[in-house]
Structures are given as structure tokens and as C-alpha cells.
Amino acid sequence: MTCGKENSEGRIVVTMTYNETKILRWTSPEPRSNNMIWSGDLEIDDITPTLANHLSLSEPTLATSLVAGSILQITPSGMYFNDTVRKQVSAQERIVQASVVGKDIILVVYNDSGVWTLWSITVDVTHPSEGSQGDDISFSFKGQIDLPREPSAIRLIHFQYSSFHLL
Amino acid sequence: MVAFVAYHYPRKLVIHHLTDTMDPITQFHLDPETPNDTPEDPRASEIHSIDVIYGQGHTYVLLGMRHGSMISCKLDRMDNSISFVEPQTTKFGQSQVEFITATHDEVQRNLGPMERNSVFVRCEYLWQITLKDGVLKINEVLFDDIRMVFRIGCEF
């Protein structure tokens, strides 16, 4: 995930083999503007402890994205944004697969009753009025459909219908 | 927006249109000769990852398989129905085929028709798949002293 001026800084979200999550920050001493030659040198720091209050680090990360400058993290227990914006599934449910593009999310949720469901969710970001601080961020539920069985893979794709030759 | 959902037993790919109902639009059976109620050959490799590449009026679905191969098939439109045609298999290695995809918003706003004509694949080595003149080209990414920065898009 890239951010910062001249594409010179970003985040790497890593699920470890023991199912914990680590967050790394990479920085490039040189600018990384598009089509420019770059040495490939990166500096990488582990910033996991500084994000312990914002993200769920004791679980694997199923999918992640940068939204409004913050890391959106999806784990089996829910979706995490920061210490105040999060949406957790019930104790009878767990997220088993996720795909994210920008602010749009699809999830496969397994319920203890044996039902697999595909959820569609969007992150809503509204810019605050003058005088208040930070963006107002929330999750909005778009729809769901029960699946016949457990999927082996899922993928969310953005298409502009006007330019998509098929739909 | 659409969601691609892959299954095994038997292997198939279903495309859902992400409206309120999220109804399936179409589906593609990888083993059309296998009836739905027959368990698949357990040795068959399941779909592990999915990506799409499109541009210049052509769209291909790329299916990364568990055991080192990729199935590409062209999406074709006939009237209001969509079909998967010309499936082809490419063997990269033995390990699972993983597409390396950006998660930021790739929708171009007010920039005309959008194209997504290159994706990267990891399977033992790094590969790049490009769509040129309606044909997929696959090349291993070789590292040397010169690195160019390519950005698909970014929200910042």
C-alpha cells in the first residue's frame, strides 16, 4: 500500500505463520514517481506496537486496504479501522474470505448453523464540516446472498459499466 | 461492481452483480462433463486466486490454481448473456498461483474508458501477464539494476 508524496512511503500488512498480524512501514530515500528509474532501495520498520490499539493483531489479516489514510483490516472476527470504527461479526459467525478494492468490500461469512454467506459492504467516508477534526467513517451494508457451499476463492472487481464491454 | 466466487466439487466460477439482491449473472464450469452431484476428482487442482485483465474491447478472467497452473478464459458477450470461451491452461510451476493485485480504487474518473492490461503473478518466480492486441502475453520478470516505477493508480 502506497502513500505519501512521490509514492515514497507505504505500509505492508503481513500475516505471520502463527496467525498474528504485523504492520511494517516502508520508506524510499528517493522519490518513486511514475515512470522514473528507481534504485529499489527501501527502509522497512516494524510499527506493529504503535498500531496495537487500532487493529486486531492477534489474528490473521484476510484483506487490507488504505482508506482515507488509515489501514482497513479484515480479520476472521471483523473489520477494523481505528480504535473507534470497527464492525465485528457475532460469536456464531466468522469471516473466512475477504476481497477489498478501495472502499468496497466483499466477505464470505460462515455461520455455526452451517450457512455460507457473501456480504457486500462499503466504507463511507464523509469529510467533516469546518471546525471539526478528522473524517467521519462508517461501514454500510449493501447486500448479501447465501452461497451453496464454501468457496475456494473470491475476488471483487470494479467495473465502470459504461466502459465494460460485457455488462 | 461484480464479485467472482469460485467453488470446487465440482469446480466452477460464478459472477455476482453487487446489487441489493446480488444475483448471479453467469457461471463457468471447469469440468462440464462432471454432474453437479458427483464429487470431483480429489486430485484436481482447485481455484486458489482470481483476477481479470481487460482493454481494447477484450476481457479475460484469470484463474490461479492450487498446483501451479493458470486457466485463462475470454469473456464473450452475446446479446444479454455472457459466456466463457477459449479456456487455456498455462503451467508456471508446482506451488499455488497467486495474483499480486492492488487494493486501491482503480476506477478512473472522467478519464474515458478504463483499461487494466497488466497483472503480476507469483508462482515460484514472478511473472507478468499483459494484454496486447487482444492476446495475453506471459513473461517472467527478470530483475536487473534498472527498476522502473509503475503505478496503476492511487487515492492519494
Image (cartoon, coloured by chain):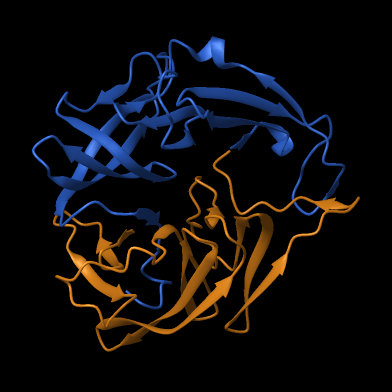
**Vertically, is B25 above or below B142?**
below
**Image quadrant where residue B38 sits:** bottom left
- Report the side of A66 relative to B16 (left or right): right
Q: Nearer the viewer, residue A76 or A40?
A: A76
- Residue in the foreground of this view, choosing between B7 and B119: B7
- The image position of residue B37, as x and y in percent, is 14, 70
Q: Is B51 positioned to the left or the right of A161 in the image? A: right
Residue at the outermost bottom position: B78
- Asked whether residue B112 appears in the rendered view, the answer is no
Give the chain coloured orange.
Answer: B
Q: Position of residue A139 (x, y in %)?
A: 28, 32
Q: Residue at x 17, y 48 (%)?
A: A144
Q: State whether residue B60 appears in this view.
A: yes
- Residue under the image location 80 percent in, 37 percent down: A31
Q: Which quadrant would the N terminus of chain A be assigned to in this image?
A: top right
x and y percentages locating residue A23 in the rendered image: 56, 23
Q: Quadrant of the C terminus of chain A?
A: bottom left
From the rendered image, report the letter of the chain displayed in blue.
A
Q: Position of residue A80 (x, y in %)?
A: 37, 24
- The answer to whether residue B94 is above or below residue A65 is below
Check the image and name the residue furthest to the left: A113
Disc tally is 0
Q: Along the horizontal axis of the image, is B92 left or right of B33?
A: right
Q: Residue at x 52, y 68 (%)?
A: B70
Residue drawn where x is 31% and y is 68% of the image: B41
Q: Nearer the viewer, residue A46 or A112?
A: A112
